[in-house]
Image: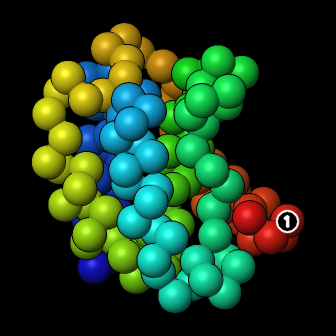
Amino acid sequence: MNDTELKELLGYCQSDGRICPNPNYWEGMFKRFRSEESYMRDTFPPNPLILGGWWASDDDEKRLRFLTHIYWAYKHNIFEQTKRYIERLDNDKWYGRYAAHEVTLDKIKEEYKKWEEYGG
């Protein structure tokens, strides 16, 4: 695992107007986090923006949350599993097909740092 793989996956997740997986698939990815040791130690990311969060957030917020979930997986040694899950999603499993603001790795790291400071 290295920064190059992370950057490639983040780029893929923003290509072709992708915002995030549709809610059921985003939740499917997130559920995998719950079995990880770091999640059990209360170092977990905020929930995906699904259900009420879906309607209360805009596309930029959804994209940032999803990409920061990927970064969380990277930092907690479950990147490879997360990457495989994402790469197996067919195009019709993704939300968004138009350009939203691209999120940089620096912005993702900044968001992740907030999660750490506020305990997830």
Toward the viewer: 69 or 113? 69
Residue indicated by mark 1: 118
Q: Which residue lies most toward the top here?
A: 98
On the picture, is 103 further left or further right than 57?
left
Looking at the image, residue 26 lies above or below residue 75: above
Mark 1 residue element: loop
User: Which residue is drawn at the image coordinates 39% and 65% (left, top)?
Assistant: 32
User: Which residue is drawn at the image coordinates 55% and 53% (left, top)?
Assistant: 68
On the picture, is 112 further left or further right than 97?
right
Q: Which colour scheme appears in the figure?
A: rainbow
Q: Where is the C terminus found, in terms of image quarters?
A: bottom right
On the picture, is 66 further left or further right than 96?
right
Residue 41 at what x, y percent from top left?
66, 87
Give the amino acid at mark 1.
Tyr
Residue 47 at what x, y percent from top left?
63, 50
Number of labelled discs?
1
**Residue 111 shows up from this direction:** yes
User: Which residue is drawn at the image coordinates 37% and 23% (left, top)?
Assistant: 95
Q: Residues within 10 Å of mark 1 (few under 14, many from 20)?
A: few
Looking at the image, residue 56 lies above or below residue 107: above
Residue 42 at what x, y percent from top left?
70, 79
Looking at the image, residue 117 lies above or below residue 95: below
Residue 59 at what x, y percent from top left?
56, 22
Q: Image quarter for residue 58?
A: top right
**Residue 4 shows up from this direction:** no
User: Which residue is drawn at the image coordinates 51% and 70% (left, top)?
Assistant: 34
Q: Where is the N terminus found, in terms of image quarters?
A: bottom left
